[in-house]
Image: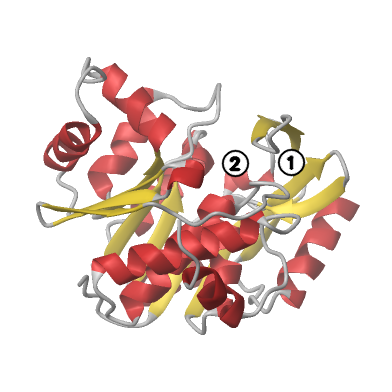
Amino acid sequence: MIRVKNQKVLCLGEVLWDMLPSGPVAGGAPMNVAIHLKKFGLDVSMASKVGEDQSGKALVDFIEQAGLGLELIQHDAVLPTSKVLVHLDQNNNATYEICHPVAWDNIQLTNQLKAIGVEAGLIIFGTLASRDAETRKTVLDLLENNCLKLVDINLRQPYDQKDVVETMLHKADIAKLNDEELVVISQWHNKHKHDEKSIISWLAETYQLETIVVTRGDKGAIAYHQNKFYDHPGYVVSAVDTVGSGDAFLAGFVASLFEDKPIPDALAFACATGALVATKRGGTPLYETSEIYDIMQCKK
């Protein structure tokens, strides 16, 4: 089990519109995670920035309707609200075209954000939002707090710079990434010819990570915690789109940790949460927690 000092979570980073072929859907990994965690009953704060435009107003309305507070949503008078072009292949797997610069590239360390950061038991941050210096400085300042820190690796070209990603890895206690991102990071250090578990062990030792979780798409996930590995094969579902499935997985894993569930149980719940979201449109669809448990009754 993983211990935290309290039940307060701060999610920090991008909020945006995913421009799907079927129309715009509110998204951004940290916001998606925050919304799922809120659904699971956790005390969650979301920090980001939108532009003073119609897209920003609509996004703020969405965040409020999702039940998240707006006190840490900043507004930028110059930079626009973020939009991401989402392309789905024949298997409904998503690739992303991310505009730059946007409002969340300029998140400021306000007194209110600083205070909530000090109180947090867990800070969840991603690598994408740290692509520019201003937001990166804010993130790094917040990570000086005495709390558990979880980095969500999001390698989105061309914003997948080795120095930025490694800076964030060094600041984290827990890392979540997918199997393709694991290979990319291992290639930076000529470790890609090693087997998966050897690479994960190397990652944990190199960046002093207590816990690592690697998702494998429809093949489940693997977790590493205190020198032990835990595998889960995942669940068979009919995918509508995979947008936000990894974010749902992460929220399911975090929510399980707050309930003091053992790692194998946390991994199973996380896989089922990600699988459920893949059966629905967008990254934060409506669902009941009971639907997650229904999936967990199924066999791979």
Q: Amino acid at mark 1?
A: Leu
Residue 92 drawn above or below residue 65: above
Question: Neighbour class for label 1 at 10 Å: few (<14), some, many (≥20)?
Answer: some
Question: Would residue 102 be found to the left or right of residue 52 on screen?
Answer: left
Q: Secondary structure at mark 2?
A: helix
Most foreground residue, 111 or 41 = 41
Q: Are marks 1 and 2 in contact (CB under 8 Å)?
A: yes
> Which corner quadrant of the image does residue 71 belong to?
bottom right
| Residue 120 shows in this picture | no
First reached walking from the N terminus: tag 1 or tag 2? 1
Give the alpha-carbon distance from disc 1 to disc 2, as whole Å: 9 Å
| Residue 236 shows in this picture | yes
Residue at the location (11% across, 40% down)?
205
- Check residue 105 in the rendering and tell me which mark sits there, or answer none: 2
Residue 43 drawn above or below residue 233: below
Most foreground residue, 63 or 119 = 63
Q: How many circles with numbers are drawn on the protein?
A: 2
Q: For mark 1, what is the residue?
A: 79
Point out residue 244 in the picture as x, y percentages from the top left corner.
61, 52
Q: Amino acid at mark 2?
A: Asp
Locate the N terminus by quadrant: bottom left
Point out residue 274 in the picture as x, y percentages from the top left corner.
54, 58
Point out residue 251 in the picture as x, y percentages from the top left corner.
47, 65
